[in-house]
Image (cartoon, helix red, strand yellow):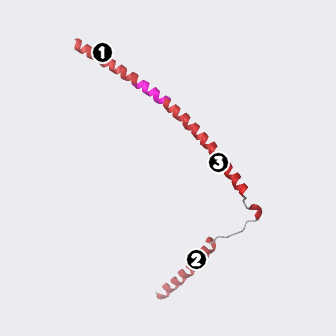
Amino acid sequence: MPVASSSTMTLGRALRDDMDERSRSCCEPEIVEAPPSQHATRSDVKACESALRTEIKTIETALRSEIRSQVSEARGDLIKWLACVVGLQTVVLVGAIVALVCVVGS
């Protein structure tokens, strides 16, 4: 048995060392200097910032418009429901008064 465990330990250490080398080579960052033609200038950054701000404003305007339309649609639905409820409540109240008058008058 000691021979098997010794060879197993040796094999385990060999595998571990091999994996350490692979993981180190895989995970070490590779730093490469970009050529000057690919460097961003201040004007490039400002142009990108301006484009992003314009895009954000456009999206914000579209969202505000959509939200306003949904709120006005919900407001209209709410008014319809309230009118129906008030009408139904009036009918029930008049019916109750008529029934009360019929019961008391008899």
Q: Nearer the viewer, mark 1 or mark 3?
A: 3
Could you say which disc has been placed on residue 98 in the image?
A: 1
Could you say which disc has been placed on residue 54 in the image?
A: none
Task: Pick whichever of labels 3 and 2 is earlier in the sequence.
Answer: 2
CA gap, disc 3 and disc 2: 46 Å
Q: Hey, which residue is sitting farthest right in the picture?
A: 37
Residue located at (26% from left, 17% from top): 100
Residue type at numbered disc 2: Asp
Residue type at numbered disc 1: Val
Q: Which residue is identified by label 2?
A: 20
In the image, residue 81 sits, relative to residue 40, either above or below, namely above
Quick check: is 70 in the magenta stretch?
A: no
- Quadrant in the picture for the C terminus: top left
Q: Nearer the viewer, residue 19 or 9?
A: 19
Task: Pick whichever of labels 1 and 3 is earlier in the sequence.
Answer: 3
Q: Which residues are magenta?
A: 76-85
Is disc 3 surrounded by few (<14), some (14 to 19) or many (20+) residues within 10 Å? few
Q: Nearer the viewer, residue 42 or 97?
A: 42
At numbered mark 3, what does the secondary structure look like: helix, strand or loop?
Answer: helix
Task: Pick whichever of labels 2 and 1 is earlier in the sequence.
Answer: 2
Left or right? Give the position of 1 relative to 21: left
Q: Which residue is identified by label 3?
A: 53
Residue type at numbered disc 3: Arg
Q: Main secondary structure of the magenta part?
A: helix
- Percent coordinates x, y for residue 37 in the rendering: 77, 62
CA gap, disc 2 and disc 1: 92 Å
> Would you say the residues marked 3 and 2 are in contact, meaning their CB atoms lie under 8 Å apart?
no
> Would you say the residues marked 1 and 3 are in contact, meaning their CB atoms lie under 8 Å apart?
no
CA gap, disc 1 and disc 3: 67 Å
Residue 65, image quadrant: top right
